[in-house]
Structures are given as C-alpha cells and as structure tokens.
Amino acid sequence: MQRAYMDRIIDGIEWIAAFFVGIVALDIFLSVLLRNTLNYSIPDSFDIGRMLLGILIFWGIAATSYRGTHITVDLIWGNVGPRYQRWIDIFATLVLLFVVTVQTWTLFDKVRGTYEDNVLTFDLHMPTWPFFAIAWIGDVSAVLLIAIRTYRLIFHPEEIHDPHVKVTE
C-alpha cells in the first residue's frame, strides 16, 4: 500500500515535469511561428519563456533525481563490488538531498523577495512571483523524491527503478 502511494507521487511529479516540457516547447514554437510568419511578437514572450524554462529546470531536477538519470561519473562506482556500489549510491544521494534542500531554502527566499518587491513583467505587468513559486514547488518535489530515493536505497533497494542499483545484503 505504501509503495503504491509513493509510486503514484513519483509518477505524478514526472507527469508534471513532462507537462512543463510541453508548455516550453509550445511557447517556443508559437513565438517563432508568429515572429517568422506574421512578424508579430507575443507580449512578454521573452520573460515568460525564461521563467517557464526555470520552472522546467526545477521540475526536471525532481524528475531526474529519483530515477538517477542525471549525469553521473562512475569511475569508482564501476570498479567496486555491489556492496560498495550501494554505499556510494547512498552517500551520493545524501549529498544530493542536502544540496537540493539548501537550494530549495534559498529559492523560497527568491519567491518571497519577488512577491514583496512586486516584480512585474515589462509589457503586461504580470507579477513574476507565481512563476518562481511554481519552480519552488518543483524544487520541493525534488527534495521529496530524493528523500524517497534515499529511504529506498537504505531500507528497500529492490524498490528502486534504477538499472544501476543492485540488490545486495
């Protein structure tokens, strides 16, 4: 029951990240299409595009952190036995958890700052803090998924959906 619940959370976060990939692709496509065919620029398209890209980055961190599909260097990991590979995985995931938690804390400060300073886009005068808040929620999701990954690496390595992780005692 608990495993199925955690897997639904993981899948949901990955679907949200995929949704933002689609939104960014659509924004770029429409901006280029309108600029090249009608010589028209969407108001605030640059600001909205870069903020959407920021959202995509933070939700992408969430999606890749659990699966362990981010860029890794396996020079040592590939040359040790399964038991030490698991310990390296646990250590690396704990370091990642610490770094992303600190990043989440500092990003919240940025969300609060843009809200309090009433930072607006240039053309439409839209507040920017909601974009930062959505990115922050993605970062919170990354912390949650990394914590789940850490828990599973330590206590239930058989539940990790990572081809690198071998179940060892």
Image (cartoon, grey):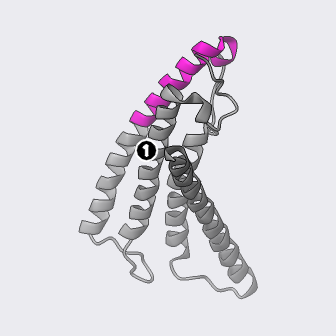
Query: Quick check: is 84 in the magenta stretch?
Result: yes
The residue most toward the top is: 80
Residue at (51%, 53%) from the top-left corner?
A: 9
For residue 161, side relative to residue 115 (left or right): right
The residue most toward the left is: 116
Query: Quick check: is 32 in the magenta stretch?
Result: no
Residue at (40%, 79%) from the top-left corner?
A: 126
Q: Which residues are magenta?
A: 77-98
Residue 60 lies, with reference to residue 31, above or below; the image says above
Quarter of the image containing the C terminus?
A: top right
Residue 81: horizontal and vertical position, in percent?
A: 66, 11
Residue 121: horizontal and vertical position, in percent?
A: 41, 75
Name the dominant secondary structure of the magenta segment. Answer: helix
In the foreground, 26 or 43:
26
In the foreground, 84 or 25:
84
Q: Secondary structure at mark 1?
A: helix
At label 1, the amino acid type is Val
Q: Which residue is mark 1?
A: 143
The residue most toward the front is: 1
Residue at (50%, 77%) from the top-left corner?
A: 44
